[in-house]
Amino acid sequence: QDLDTDEEITYQMVSPEEASYEDNKLSILAPIGKGLLGHAEGEELAIEVPAGTLNYKVLKIERPK
């Protein structure tokens, strides 16, 4: 969840080769991907990106089946 806009966003973490911004598939090496990795549900975090700081809350984590 974007804490600044209250928008809920679903991202899929993928390898750099599979990344597609239009499909919300984030590279694990991209700034947002790196910022999200290792966090747990319910955590609030600030992610530094070239355009500034993104304030997010992790609502749910799903593992691929």
Image (spheres, grey):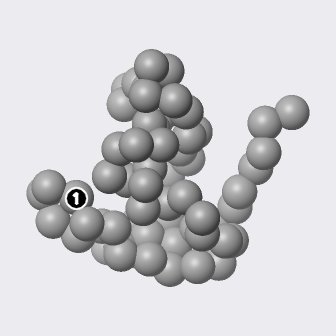
Position above or below: 26 against 45? above
Give the quarter of the image for residue 21. Answer: top left
The quarter of the picture where the C terminus appears is top right
Front-most of residues 19 and 24: 19
Which residue corresponds to mark 1?
Answer: 49
Front-most of residues 37 and 21: 37
Judged from this view, the residue extending furthest toward the right is 65
Residue displayed at 22% across by 58% down: 49
Q: Position of residue 32 (x, y in %)?
A: 37, 53
Q: Disc 1 marks which amino acid? A: Val
Residue displayed at 52% across by 72% down: 57
Q: Position of residue 31 (x, y in %)?
A: 32, 52
Give the quarter of the image for residue 17. Answer: top left
Q: Position of residue 7 (x, y in %)?
A: 43, 60
Classify mark 1: residues with Cα within 10 Å, few (<14), some (14-19) or many (20+): few
Position above or below: 4 against 15? below
